[in-house]
Each structure stands twice: as structure tokens, then as C-alpha cells.
Amino acid sequence: MPELPEVEVTRQSFGDRILGGQVQAVFLGKPLRWPLGCDPDSLVGLTVGAASRRGKYIWLPLGSGGLLLHLGMSGSLVFATELADKGPHDHFELVTNHGVLRLTDPRRFGAVVWSPGLDQGPAQRLLMELGMEPFDPAFDGDSLHAGLRNRRLSIKQALLSGKIVVGAGNIYACEALFQAGIDPRTPSHRLGSQRCKRLAQAVKETLSRAVQLGGSTLRDFHDAHGAAGQFQTQAMVYGREGEPCGNCGAIIKRLLQGQRSSFYCPRCQRR
DNA sequence: AAGTGGACCTGCTAGC
DNA sequence: TGCTAGCAGGTCCACT
């Protein structure tokens, strides 16, 4: 489900309210992608710090360490003082005196992992290979060009890999490539500095617009208050196979790249 | 070393 | 109506 915008919208929607809370209990459901990595009872009494985001991960400081949360494909977080009874897909709860943070994740590709610090332990291991943050001013056409110039994989897969820039998943990679006028199959090294500049700009704009619109709600995404996103209504290509391009009228096509669907306009987007 | 495909898991939909 | 195949917002790991 969640790409950078959904993760950021989620973080913003509960971060302020949980800040300063004290852990009263921790509930674990079925196993997630990775084990928590500590005794859940050892978190009781710890104080919650300011939630931050790196790529599609949320870092929630707790005491001297913290929890690294990932929503996988189908995860969402809810934060409330009063929550409905637990359902079959609720696999983690952090009960605090400010409210309860609950992870619901049917497919269980998500994770909640204890780490002694952002730059130590599991968090360090999971985050160290990540590419640049798209909203970092250092991410621009030049840095993108430098990251792509020796790569032979397609530009779509390069964006999805997260090794150059993080945050664009399948929806936003498709949308950014459309906005930049680049065919998703284009070999990365064939993009010159001019097109890299356009693409870096498109990635920044696509992701920031999506954050402003509250993310994309394709089937079930909601922020921690329960609000749905609106970006999907403005998607130009994602999920629009067979429809006319809003820009030129050509029929939007779908193809498979690395077992993932890519949507593109064969007229607006060039190799 | 970079690139590819499989694996993890459940739910929903389109089509027969 | 009921079954099945195919699809889904991610990413680690083993293998070439």
C-alpha cells in the first residue's frame, strides 16, 4: 500500500499526539515480517519521542532506543484514545497514556522492530543502503544523473529499487515518469543530464503533491485519524490502462517490469 | 557486481 | 452462485 506520501501522512497524523506519551502495554498479534527483537514488556514505562521518517520507514523514539515501523504492502496505523476491539489483522499495539497506536496489516509484510538507535542495530542495517531523500535539496538532476549513469536496468526499476532515491513506489514512479515524459523501459544510463533534471523535479513534485492530498487511497489506505487520501483521483497513468491520456488522448498502456505493472502513455513518454 | 526472479501473506475481482 | 486465476501500494535474499 504505502509509498512515501502515505507513510509521511501517517507520521504527521499521529506524531504530535503520541509525543511525550508513556508506554503502558504492548500487544503482539501474528508474526510480521521480522520479530520485534525485544521483550515487549521491556518497553513499558518508556517515553515516546518525536516520530521521524526515512524512506518508507517511521522511526519512533522510545526511551534510549526506538521502534522502526514499516507498513509493507497492506499496513496502516491508527492512533486513538478509544479503539474498537481488535480484529484478525491487528498485529501490533503500543498502548500509551496519550492513546493507542495500532498496526493493521492483512498481508503482514510490514514490520515493527526494536533498535537501540537509528544508527545502530537493526535500524542501521535496514536504512544504510537507502538512497537519497527526495525532498533533500541535495537530490537534484545532477545527483540523479550520477546515480543512474552506470546502471543498465530500466529507469522504472531504478526508481523502485530505492538505491538512488527513496520513496517512489509503483504509483509514484509511474506518475513521475509520466510527468517527466520518460518511457519506463528506458535504460537508466541513457538518460542525459537534461532528462535527469526533469525527472528529479517530477519525483519531488509528484511526492509532495501526494503528501498535500493526503496520499492515495486505492482500496484501504487511511491516515491515523481514519481520513482517506485523494491523490488517486489525479493519477494520470497509474491504474488507467485502456483510458485515454489526459494530455494527448492516446490510450494508456500497461506492461510488466520485474513482475510489477507499469502504466504509461506511449505518445507522451519517450525512450 | 549488477541484475533477475522467487519468496513472504491475505484479500479482492474478473472471468468462466 | 461458486470456483480459480490473477492481481495488489514492498523489499529482502539467493542465484546468475
Image (tube, coloured by chain):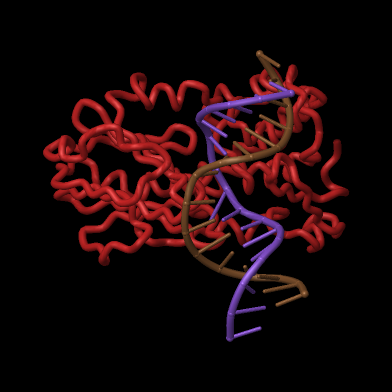
Chain colours: A red, B brown, C purple
**Residue A54: where, in percent of width, then height?**
44, 32
Considering only vertical position in the picture, is A44 above or below A27? above
The C terminus of chain A appears in which quarter of the rendering? top right
Give whichever of A133, A136 is nearer the camera. A133
**Horizontal relation, residue A150 to residue A132: left or right:** right
The quadrant holding residue A67 is top left
**Horizontal relation, residue A48 to residue A237: left or right:** left
Q: Count up the numbered dots.
A: 0
**Residue B5: where, in percent of width, then height?**
70, 37
The quadrant holding residue A106 is bottom left
Considering only vertical position in the picture, is A68 above or below A229? above
The quadrant holding residue A81 is bottom left
- Residue in the image at 21% along x and 46% along y: A26
Give whichever of A45, A26 is nearer the camera. A26
**Horizontal relation, residue A20 to residue A72: left or right:** left
**Horizontal relation, residue A169 to residue A45: left or right:** right
- Residue in the image at 63% along x and 48% along y: A171
- Residue in the image at 77% along x and 24% along y: A152
**Residue A65: where, in percent of width, then height?**
25, 27
**Residue A157: where, in percent of width, then height?**
69, 35
